[in-house]
Amino acid sequence: MIFLSNRSHADDIYELLGRSINQLVKYFDEPEKKRGLITPILCGEDGLVNALEKTLSYGLKKSTGNVPFFGGGRKRYAWDFLIKVCDEYDGRRSQWQRTKQEKTIIYYINGVRSIEKGLATFGKDGRFQSWCCLACKLRLLSDWFQLLTQCSDSCLQQFYDPSNNCFRQEKLNQFIVNILQPIRDFDFAHLEPALLKGLAGV
């Protein structure tokens, strides 16, 4: 899919997320014995993972900066931002310990670290997929997205256009938070093992 402008990209996010969530609702509305594999619903072209990847790519800077003689820096991925946010929360534990978000943040940090260590041979898109699947299984996807939203401006601006992104556009951000919340009611306990292969204790 090619996004022609920031506005069309934002519009696509509404459509992609809406379609992917509707698929999940229909899947879980079926009697358990009649359900097929969830992998195509979650990880297929119209699935939630792809919709989230497009969402987190909105406003993402294309590279890390200029590199002499090569005309560009290393390509950025949504996964790079997830790691940076993890590092930021990990480095300021005194600010969130003993708060109501403590458990959610610990799960986020441990999840990202586990994926980065256990899936080191995977590409960054593969690690992002595992992160999405893990968040669904733990029923923390909406909460983890809110953690990303609450990262510092300095952290965000290393990766994103300051105003054109899904974290600082209030209407779009609230839509995403709201549409992801019902996912916590779905039971992903029986995800295919391959989706979380290599992750200890999940």
Image: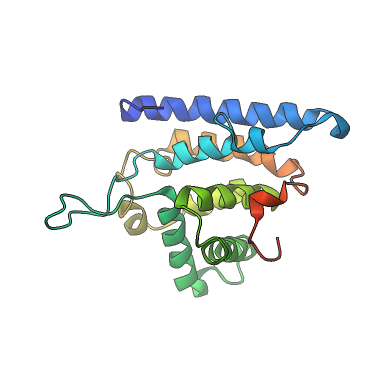
Q: Nearer the viewer, residue 2 or 25?
A: 2
Q: Nearer the viewer, residue 139 or 23?
A: 23
The residue sitting at the left extreme is 69
Instruction: Tell me which colouring the rendered structure shows.
Output: rainbow
**Residue at (65% x, 54% y) in the render:** 196
Is residue 139 something that shows in the picture?
no
Q: Give residue 14's position: percent from left, percent from top.
A: 50, 27
Quarter where residue 187 is shown: top right
Q: Nearer the viewer, residue 136 or 180?
A: 136
Q: Give residue 112's position: percent from left, percent from top.
A: 54, 61
Q: Is residue 62 above or below residue 152?
A: above
Position of the N terminus, as image quadrant, is top left
**Residue at (59% x, 33% y) in the render:** 44
**Residue at (29% x, 45% y) in the render:** 62
Q: Is residue 149 left or right of residue 144?
A: left
Quarter where residue 107 is shown: bottom right
